[in-house]
Amino acid sequence: MSFRTAARLSAFFLFALAAMARAQAPAQGSTQTAATVSPRTASDSLLAAASAGDAKAQFELGNYYFGARYSTLHYAEALDWYRKSAAQGFAPAQDQLGSMYENNFGVPQDYKRAVSYYRLAANQGFALAQYHLAAMFKAGRSVHRDYKQAFSWCRKAADQNLADAEEELAYFYQNGFGVQRDYPQALAWYRRAAAHGDPDAENQLGYMAGEGWGQQQNYGEALSWYYQAAEHGNAEAEENIGYIFQHGTGVATDYGKALAWFDKAAAQGNGDAENQIGWMYQFGQGVQQDNARALSWYQLAADQGNINGERNLEAVTADLDEDGTAQSASGPVHDADYEQAQRWASIQDLHRRIDAAEADAEYQESVASQLEGMSKGKKDVVSKLFTAMGDAGAVKYHLLAEKDRAEAESLRDQLARIEDRSQPFPGPRIP
């Protein structure tokens, strides 16, 4: 059962799996967030305004290209327009660049640059950047880990009604990070974030009700909050509901409902749910015992970095090897729920690989530009020699960048084939 306890890392550590990712760019959830532009609605007027130097238009045009980066070849344009906007001091663009450098979104990961961009925007009072900067202090990325600084920046963002920051501030109070542990304050901030539509806060309210933290233990209230978070698409809440029905926590045990909720969470890449499905197949909980399915689900969870999935995969594999039945459990699994979860994982993996390839291309081009700038404008013999050497070296890096872009394009083709092959998954029917 997955809860955001003191042992859980911040959302930034989970970025690669989540959408992860409430902290992902473009900015979401803030009352200060500039309007983004759908890839289908970019217009000549927007391009004209951006070309004329309008910082907000430049940011919106960057969003247009950024939003289409997994389907078009125009990633470099997104970076270019964001940089132009940020150079004019436009805080949302500065925050966006910080997020890109932090998360390896098509640029080489650079925490120092990320902190610098976040700080520029945060000092202007931009709530999302304040929240992001708080996370950097909390994680100790390019700065000394400092919970008090993290709490201070998070509070600034929360005071501007940024739901993510309100939920994070509650987490600080829940665990005593940078402030004395205070469950009533944690509850108050979780409820405020939930009122602003934050499903993570709804999920946490369910956890605190189930544990009886700051209130009388109430499984019914816990389940109610989980249902509310699940209605808003929160995969952890879906997994938590499944766990409750699997173990009969405050309700009658119902393996059918448990499996259905685990399937919904797994369809969004929740590794805990994938592990639990493997467990149910291993021990025949509400389903026919099936080692092949158990292994497949454990493997999928392990591929997502789920430690329980890794351990269960290792244990079951060892048991099957010992009794000589490993080969019979190694066949392919044809199961719609499994294939959907596998498809989700493949899509997320391709997204990461496209971003990484574009980041490599960006790095190669930056090296080429530096080499081309060697001794430019100077007329002496030595300078001319260095210029020739630089130009020759630059050709190599331009070719490497072109190779990286070709790889990104090949990955985009793979992504398109996967996305075209299946319709969006509606989720299993809940009994």
Image (cartoon, rainbow, N blue to C red):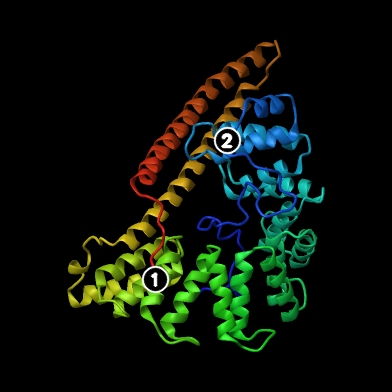
Comparing 419 with 389, the one in front is 419
Q: Secondary structure at mark 2?
A: helix
Q: Secondary structure at mark 1?
A: helix
Kindly identify which residue carries mark 2: 65
- Along the horizontal axis of the image, is 117 left or right of 263? right
In percent of width and height, residue 314 lies at 34, 71
Around disc 1, counting alpha carbons within 10 Å, would you say few (fewer than 14), some (14 to 19), or many (20 or more)?
many
Q: Is residue 3 above or below residue 399?
A: below
Residue 144 seen anywhere in this rendered image of the structure: yes
In percent of width and height, residue 91 lies at 76, 44
The residue under the point 61% across, 15% down is 385
Comparing 275 with 374, the one in front is 275
Q: Earlier in the sequence, mark 1 or mark 2?
A: 2
- Along the horizontal axis of the image, is 75 left or right of 157? left
Task: Kindly identify which numbered label has been placed on residue 15.
Answer: none
Q: Is residue 428 above or below residue 107?
A: below
- Depth check, mark 1 against mark 2: the one in front is 1
**Mark 2: amino acid:** Tyr
Comparing 424 with 268, the one in front is 424
- Residue 265, picture quadrant: bottom left
Q: Is residue 291 above or below residue 344?
A: below
Q: Is residue 120 above or below residue 405?
A: below
Kindly identify which residue carries mark 1: 260
The residue under the point 33% across, 46% down is 421
Comparing 160 with 342, the one in front is 160
- Residue 232, picture quadrant: bottom right
- The furthest residue to the right: 124
